[in-house]
Amino acid sequence: LASTEVDISKIAAGQAIKTVWRKQPVFIRNLTPDEIKAANSVPLSELRDPQTLAQRTKPGKANWLITLGVCTHLGCVPLGTGEGENRGPFGGYFCPCHGSAYDTAARIRQGPAPKNLVVPDYEFVSDTTVRIG
Ligand code: FES
């Protein structure tokens, strides 16, 4: 399948799910206001792969962070979508393979990964449905 539709109506603020698109894991996260604030308070000069949260989300939908669940170091699946999983020191995702830590915009902040988690092509089909791909 070239694209996949996902119902996001059950993802509460602060939660994330893992889905699959083109055999790759995709993370869909509903950021809390504090997580959005944390992402927006980081100076771009501190970022290895400088991007704002606004560049990584859709207009008016800054709380919906959709990324591939593939670490940009060597491709492990980072932790942070499951209940109680380690989200790492920057509160986003944490790759247990070699310790790459991503922030609440899924930007690389620490460890060997060179790039932010990749934002795939997607669009909102409705307020509760996202089409990825
Ligand atoms: Fe994620 Fe190496 S594969 S840190």
Image (cartoon, rainbow, N blue to C red):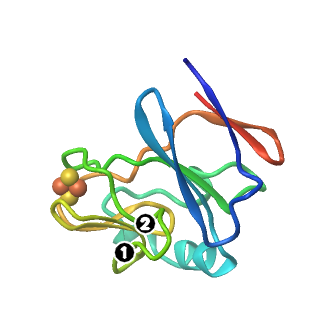
Give the labeled residue for mark 1: 86
Which residue is the extreme one toward the front?
A: 83
- The structure residue drawn at horizontal position 68% and vertical position 60%, both measured from the top left corner, is 11
- The structure residue drawn at horizontal position 43% and vertical position 66%, both measured from the top left corner, is 80
- Answer left or right for 31 relative to 18: right
Residue 113 visible at all: no
- The structure residue drawn at horizontal position 41% and vertical position 61%, both measured from the top left corner, is 107
Q: Nearer the viewer, residue 132 or 57?
A: 132
- Amino acid at dot 1: Asn
Q: Position of residue 41 (x, y in %)?
A: 54, 79
- Amino acid at dot 2: Gly
Q: Quadrant of ligand 1?
A: bottom left
Using the numbered discs, state the Cα–Cα distance from disc 2 to disc 1 in whole angstroms.
6 Å
Q: Position of residue 4 (x, y in %)?
A: 62, 29
Contact (Cβ within 8 Å) of mark 2 with mark 1 = yes
| Sequence-wise first label, 2 or 1 | 2
92 in relation to 132, above or below: below
Give the labeled residue for mark 2: 80
Q: Nearer the viewer, residue 81 or 29?
A: 81
48 in relation to 121, above or below: below
Q: Specify few, some or many for label 2: CA neighbours under 10 Å numbering under 14, 14-19, or 20 or more.
A: many
- The structure residue drawn at horizontal position 35% and vertical position 56%, both measured from the top left corner, is 49
- Element under disc 1: loop
- Answer left or right for 57 relative to 61: left
* Quarter of the figure with the N terminus: top right
Residue 81 visible at all: yes
